[in-house]
Each structure stands twice: as structure tokens, then as C-alpha cells.
Amino acid sequence: MKMVYVDNNATTQVASEVFEEMSPYLTRYYGNPSSMYTFAGQVGDKLREAAAKVADLLGAAPEEIVFTSCGTESDNTAIHAALRSNPDKRHIVTTRVEHPAVKSLCEDLSKRGYRVSFVPVDHKGRLDLDYLYDHLTDDTAVVSIMWANNESGVIFPIPEIAKKIRDRGIVFHTDAVQAVGKVPIDLSSVPVDMLALSGHKLHAPKGVGVLYIRKGTKFSPFLIGGHQERGRRGGTENVASIVALGKACELAGQHIEEENTRVARLRDRLESELLARIDKASVNGDVKNRLPNTTSIGFDAVEGEAVLLLMDQIGICASSGSACTSGSLEPSHVLRAMGVPFTSAHGSIRFSLSRYNTEEQIDHIIEHLPPIIDRLRKMSPFWKQSQAG
Ligand SMILES: *Cc1c(COP(=O)(O)O)cnc(C)c1O
């Protein structure tokens, strides 16, 4: 059976070029980069090369790149470091639509004596910037705002926010896990202090990430141990994965144009065909300011989980807008924050594409999804009600 993978905001396929680049570092070049002999020294050189490639994609300097174990570690490290370097300040500003890597941490901190302001979004998933600026105080230690949302795909105006916050003595962190490789990023002109990215969202393996720390930003490590990463993160480097992430960033730079043209066109065709063929369907989020690979579509009067199950039977991998992981069928916190109506939020499906998707795969979804929605609606009391009403 053919498989159509359109869940790239959850994770991506490792690019073959990336796998080729990393595999010698799992087999031949196993030296510890901290060791003195030449055999290990060449491993250290390769790590520096990887840092340079990541820095290049971000418009940063190689010394500003710290490799971590994942996006979650990068986010946690950034926020903890900001709080530690401002011990007198007890206030955090973040948004209502962050990934759990930031959201759950901030909720936890709010139980440990910190005050947290969660910036709301409107019905299109756009940030309430007035709320954000109005809530900055002398007590604010850190502002953490994602660059792009993983569910709606909506892009936040990070360059504008960063410029407003600079010089206020507040650390500005951004979770750019979904933005890197899809949105051009140039940190030489965008004054964020810290930025998180994750390997497995851009065709590198799972279990490696980066924390960018701008030169001059006060920092204290989260993992305290050896002198790796210039003392900013203890622990022997995950050499092969770091090499992979370097290569993935190099490729991302080369493919960003394709993301924004061919991939965006595939996404747009998928979206417009589904909306044309399926009654009572609507896009969640600001279509004018969105990641090129993402569409979240709400289908009225069906259960997202049921749609996923039936799509799975014909090889389509996507994700729903409900927090199925929690065991409840509550719509996700993102769709709730956007105020998406109950019956549409429950039937929301996120499709997230990549450069590996083809026209034929999109045809497969366009052909098979409408009858699935039809079939489910015929069994739905909500649908019968809405048709009768
Ligand atoms: C996936 C993701 C993360 C977490 O990255 P991991 O490497 O899986 O820990 C954080 N933020 C966003 C927006 C994500 O999409």
C-alpha cells in the first residue's frame, strides 16, 4: 500500500544526504571530541563545521550555537537561564498557543512563585500585540514567543516584537522549531537573545537540537557537567546527530525557495480542492501569514480521530486538532485559544507537507478524503441536526 506522509510538523524523514553525512560518525570516527589525539581532533573539527552551517542558516556566528538533545531541552534551557540571570524578577510573558515545551514549563513555573502572562490570539490565530506590550513590566524577566505555530502554521511577527523589546532589559526567547527552514531567518538584524530549533523537524534525526545564544547574553547552563559547548552544556556531544543537523541546515537553506513555491503550491491545491469538494469545511488560521507547508482544516460534524483512523487505512498520515494524547477528546489548546467553534474544532485535521511530497500524493488525498467525511457525517447526529436545521 502506498503511504502519503503529510505530518511533517510532527516529525520529518531524515534526508538521504543527511544520513550519508552522519553515518561515518557512528562507525569510523568514534573518538571523543574532547580527547587530545588527532583521531578525536578531526571529530572536533566536524562539530565546528556543523555549528558553522547552523549559524549560516540563522545569520548567526558559530560561537552562538549550542547543541542540545532536542527542541524541548533548548526551550527549557533558555527560559531557566533567563530566570537565573535575573533572580530579582518574577514575571514571564508567553502565549496561549505555545508548544508544550514552553507552555507546560511556564505552567509549572507559575506554581513555583512566578507570575505568567499568557498572550491571547484572535480567531485567525494572530497574536494580540497590544496585550503583549501592555503586560511588560519592570518585573518581567523573559518573554518567550514561538516564531510559527505548529498547529495553525500562523507566523508571528518576531522581528517586530524583538525590536520593541530590545533595550528593556528583558530576555527575548523564541521557539523557532517550526520556522527554521520554512521562513527566512536572519538574526543579524532580528535582536532575539535566544532561539530554539530541533533536528527532526527539518530532516535530521530525532534527539538533537540547537539553542542559539546571542553573544553578550547572560547565560547559565541547564546541564552542568564537562566543559563541552564552551561550558554552556555539559555532556559528551551527540557527534553523529550534530553532524546530521549541520547538513540538514545546509540543505534547508538550499530548499527554502522550494518550500515557499512548490511545497506551498501543493498545500494550496490540497486546501482549495478539499474546500471545493467538502461542504462545511473551513481553514483554521491566518492564510495570509502562514507556514508554506501547513494547513489546518476543520470539517464540521465529524470527529477528527475517526477521520484519522479511516485515512490511516488508506495510508494517509496526518494529525488531528484534539489532544488525543491526554485521553480526552478536548480540542487542542491552540484551537480553543483561537475560539474555533466546537463542532469544527473537533473535526480539525492538520496536513503538513515537506519537499518529499508529490502531486500524486496530493491527488490521493483529494480523491479519498471527501468520501470519508461523507461516510462519517451520515452517521453523525450533529450533521443530521445541521442539515435539518
Ligand atoms: C516539535 C516541537 C518542539 C519540540 O521539539 P523536540 O525536539 O521534539 O523536543 C518544540 N516546539 C515546537 C513548535 C515544535 O513543533
Image (cartoon, rainbow, N blue to C red):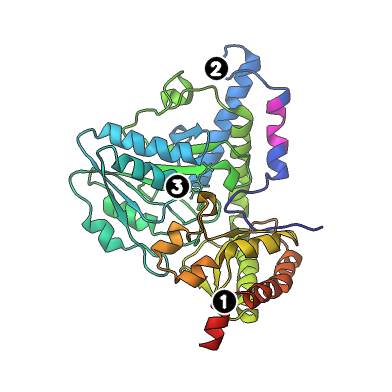
- The picture places residue 86, in percent across and down from the top left corner, at 24, 35
Magenta highlight: main SS:
helix
Labels 3 and 2 touching (C-beta < 8 A):
no
Q: In this figure, which residue is indicated by the disc labeled 1?
A: 381
For the residue with label 2, is its CB less than 8 Å from the closest atom of ligand 1? no
Q: Earlier in the sequence, mark 3 or mark 2?
A: 2
> In this rendering, is residue 341 above or below 191?
below
Labels 2 and 1 touching (C-beta < 8 A):
no
Tell me where the magenta segment starts and ends, as one range: 20-26
Distance from the alpha carbon under mark 2 to that under mark 1: 64 Å
Q: Residue, x 63% and y 39% (percent of image)? A: 205
Residue 281 belongs to the span the image colors magenta: no
Report helix, strand or loop for mark 1.
Answer: helix
Q: In this figure, which residue is indicated by the disc labeled 2?
A: 34
Is residue 126 visible in the rendered structure shown here?
Answer: yes
- The picture places residue 335, in percent across and down from the top left corner, at 45, 63
Residue 141 occupies quadrant:
top left
For the residue with label 3, is its CB less than 8 Å from the closest atom of ligand 1? yes
Q: Earlier in the sequence, mark 3 or mark 1?
A: 3
Is residue 287 visible in the rendered structure shown here?
Answer: no
Amino acid identity at mark 2: Ser
Screen quadrant of the N terminus: bottom right
Query: In this image, 161 relative to 345: left or right?
Result: left
Q: Nearer the viewer, residue 101 or 233?
A: 101
**Total numbered circles:** 3
Query: In this image, 40 relative to 225: left or right?
Result: right
Q: Residue, x 70% and y 56% (percent of image)? A: 356
> In this rendering, is residue 382 above or below 203?
below
Q: Residue, x 58% and y 47% (percent of image)? A: 201
